[in-house]
Image: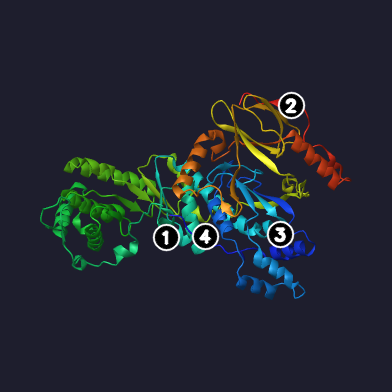
Amino acid sequence: MLRDCTVQPLLTDFYQFTMAYGYWKCGKEETNAVFELYFRENPLGGEFTIFAGLQDCLLFLSKFQLTEEDVKYLQSVLPPTTEQSFYDYLRNINTSTVTLRAMPEGSVVFPKVALLEVEGPLAIVQILETTLLTLVNYASLVATNAARFRLAAGPGKRLLELGLRRAQGPDGGVSASKYSYIGGFDGTSNVLAGKLYGIPLFGSMAHSYITSFTSMSEVKVRTLKPASEGQPAVDFVSLCEKWLVRICPLLRMSQDQINSSELAAFISYALTYPGNFIALVDTYNVMRSGVPNFCAVSLALHEMGYRTDGLRLDSGDLVQQSLKIRRTLQTCAEEFKVSWFSDIPIIISNGISEKDLINLQNQRHEVDSIGVGTNLVTCPLQPSLGCVYKLTQVCGKARIKLSEDKEKMTLPGKKTAYRLYGLDGSPFLDLLTLGDEPAPRAGEEIRCHVLNRRDECLQVTAARVETLHRVYYQHGQIYEGLCTTSEIKSHAQNSLINLHPKHKHLQDPVPYQVAISLKLCDLLNDLTKESKPTSDALNEPIASQLPVDVNGL
């Protein structure tokens, strides 16, 4: 199910409208302009980013229209000298003359390569800036963070997003659930996200459920029907108590150590969900109460034809406890001849971070599923991806922004982006060319300059060349059908699989190369000289013509 966009046109910065009035005042509002939305550096110390948020951008564009209430509000906040005719202009603007080209959502992307290219009347595409940035920035950051958690955990672990209560407000919570799923998580605790996006839901019980019970007398329903139809109901409470009597000697512990109110909570939950029983075992004492009670209830369920879904740990030394619990499950499986019992999934949570998952992989453990909340949805290691939205062309003329910080210099002109693949099937370089240049061809030598390394001129030959951008919005219509969240997730995972492992290392990854064509490099040099003719530093060529052969890629 796809969520209807609720983003309003006024979700933007005030200066977008003050600039729009300036454009209108001098007659430039209809001038054709091209903006690019991109980021300057990969986040979280990595060398890749997952592009997300495109679908929300398209829904926003398709519904963009200022209401009369919006216009009246702008009249109240813009200077009183603003001409009334400008407000008539605002009443009539829409995105029917806007074209949006973009990477497919879920693609692996790299710095300085546009995620979105927005073309249309100058005033309108200017107004769109902040909204598009807020729709892409957080989405791509969370999806990338989730992808890193997936790489840290490995492909075999089930990852569950549990971050709604820690997220930055309701919108942040729903977005985090969606984009964590796209980035590689398997499910969410967020019910609304499950409804809106078809994400599998996960949930068991909280400590409050267990501590709400004080005695077995609070279990009002005592009987349970076996899984097989046609058989009479059984006194399930008595059955669990009988199993506990058998388990305690096996585990060399006294039944007096067992918390009976915890057992009551487990029995109550099992009676409610006999085919989906999961218990939280660390409310009182994991090995002296939680696990024995869990085993007693699970074996009673087994006797009645049901199979337990798992148990969860939320405190303590999770690794060591997982080993002890697995041994206990194996002991019960062998003693009572219940083969599946030894493989009951062990789920952990409790402030899990990327570093914790890396450490987990380097230790012996028995963890099957991992719930992650705060460190996933809040991205504490980097609060923003830092996307920017920069003007690159006006009325067919290339534009450039210079800066004392060379990283903030923009790449001029309307461009085409290509991804070059090696013989091993993995990409090795993204190439930016001017829009009027012929496309590079597989099997032919390509000369280009590496971004951020001005002294290198590469000579490369690609086994395959892919054009990165597609038209997604034009003439007021979404051009390509909207993908489901699962389809975007699948594309993200395939994109990551195709990326060479050296770029995916969580520590000390090898940077992925982005390059510009010789013609784009010449334009960059020319515009730099024209803009700052007295600056010797900026008059230097962006790159030398000495080639570096990388055909071995």
Q: Which residue is mark 3?
A: 123
Instruction: Point out which mark residue 547 bears.
Output: 2
Could you say where residue 149 lies in the image, as x and y percent from the top left?
48, 46
For marks 4 and 2 on the same chain, the one whose residue lies earlier in the sequence: 4
Residue 351 vs residue 136, the one in the foreground:
136
Please give the name of the residue rendered at 66% of the width and 27% of the height, measured from the top-left corner: 460
For marks 4 and 3 on the same chain, the one whose residue lies earlier in the sequence: 4
Please give the name of the residue rendered at 16% of the width and 62% of the height, measured from the top-left corner: 222
Instruction: Point out which mark residue 75 bears.
Output: none
Q: Which residue is mark 1?
A: 192
Task: Indicate whether 61 appears above or below 211.
Answer: above
Disc 2 or disc 1, which is closer to the eye? 1
**Marks 3 and 2 in Cβ contact (< 8 Å):** no
Instruction: Measure how far apart labels 3 and 1 are at the Cα level.
Output: 36 Å
Quarter of the image with the N terminus is: bottom left
Instruction: Measure how far apart labels 4 and 2 are at the Cα level.
Output: 49 Å
Q: Secondary structure at mark 2?
A: strand
Instruction: Measure how far apart labels 3 and 2 are at the Cα level.
Output: 43 Å
Residue farthest toward the right in the current orientation of the protein: 534
Q: Which residue is mark 4?
A: 5
Residue 258 vs residue 20, the one in the foreground:
20
Using a 10 Å C-alpha cutoff, classify the residue at mark 2 as few (fewer than 14 neighbours), some (14 to 19) or many (20 or more): some
Disc 4 or disc 1, which is closer to the eye? 4
**Marks 4 and 2 in Cβ contact (< 8 Å):** no
For marks 3 and 1 on the same chain, the one whose residue lies earlier in the sequence: 3
For marks 4 and 1 on the same chain, the one whose residue lies earlier in the sequence: 4
Disc 2 marks which amino acid?
Answer: Pro
